[in-house]
Amino acid sequence: MEQSVSSRRIYRSMLAVLLIAGGVGVMSQSNAADSQSSSPNSPAPDTMQARVAACAACHGAQGQGTDNDYFPRLAGKPADYLFNQLQNFREGRRRYPPMNYLVTYLSDDYLHQIATYFSQMRPPYPTPAAATLPDSQMARGRDIVLKGDTSKNVPACIACHGNGLTGMQPAIPGLVGLHRDYISAQLGAWRSGTRHALAPDCMHAIATRLDDADIGAVAAWLSTQPAPQNPVPAPAGSMKTPLACGSEPQ
């Protein structure tokens, strides 16, 4: 069920990241040379915007995501969630070669700075996708998201991700504004174990109880949902989550 990106797409994505990252270094060196010629004591510009240029190549200048189904929105997600994911890429709990390469040698402090930067961005949300499955399947997806499935011991998505699907501080992500294929791919990765989190890995436990049709229905319905008027994560502790998750402080 897990969606895969073609080798060509991965190569192009990696090339874009490397070119952007290299470009930042070249620009910094050029700026430093210019600064030295005019004022020897003036350092090269060092801003978070410059530091995250490699991220922006795939995720957008403000982390708003792109039309590519596999480059998700980062903007506005809780900082601790983004930090956890950067750590997971660095430690190999998530696998995507350009991301694994990009963060391999970055410190926790640097990752925190990147996570905080994108968590504070508030670009507009994209127009929700149109329904792509029959009404019965869309209804199945809606029911799992809003009610869960007691027969499969699957809690409602909103029990953790909030009634507005905007997540909860400090580390539960929002689900609105994501592409259907991205959601499906991540649920498939949780289920197969190719994506991990700190134990107890609650998303792996939930995803293993969903079949292909369930995953497709949930992904399709979520992709059609508009962002609420104030699309910010719920305050920490405002919901009692049904499962303990290693990446979410208890």
Image: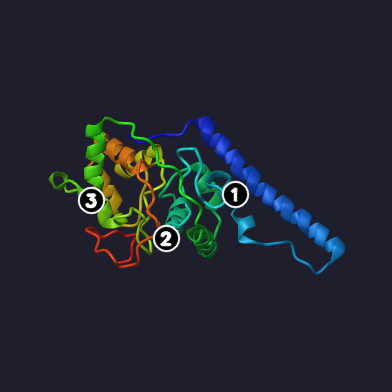
The residue at the point 35 percent across, 62 percent down is: 234
* Amino acid of disc 2: Pro
**So how many labels did they put on this image?**
3
Question: Is tag 2's residue or tag 1's residue first in the polypeptide sequence?
Answer: 1
For this orientation, the residue located farthest to the bottom is 41
Provide the residue designation for mark 3. 156
Provide the residue designation for mark 1. 54
Q: Position of residue 198 (x, y in %)?
A: 34, 57
The residue at the point 32 percent across, 60 percent down is: 246
Q: Position of residue 214 (x, y in %)?
A: 25, 38
Q: Crowding near pointer 3: few (<14 within 10 Å), some, many (20+)?
A: some
* Quadrant where the image shows the C terminus: bottom left
Left or right: 50, with 177 as reference point: right
Left or right: 106, with 245 as reference point: right
Q: Position of residue 88 (x, y in %)?
A: 43, 53
* Quadrant where the image shows the N terminus: top left
Marks 3 and 1 close (CB-CB < 8 Å): no
Q: Report the colour scheme.
A: rainbow
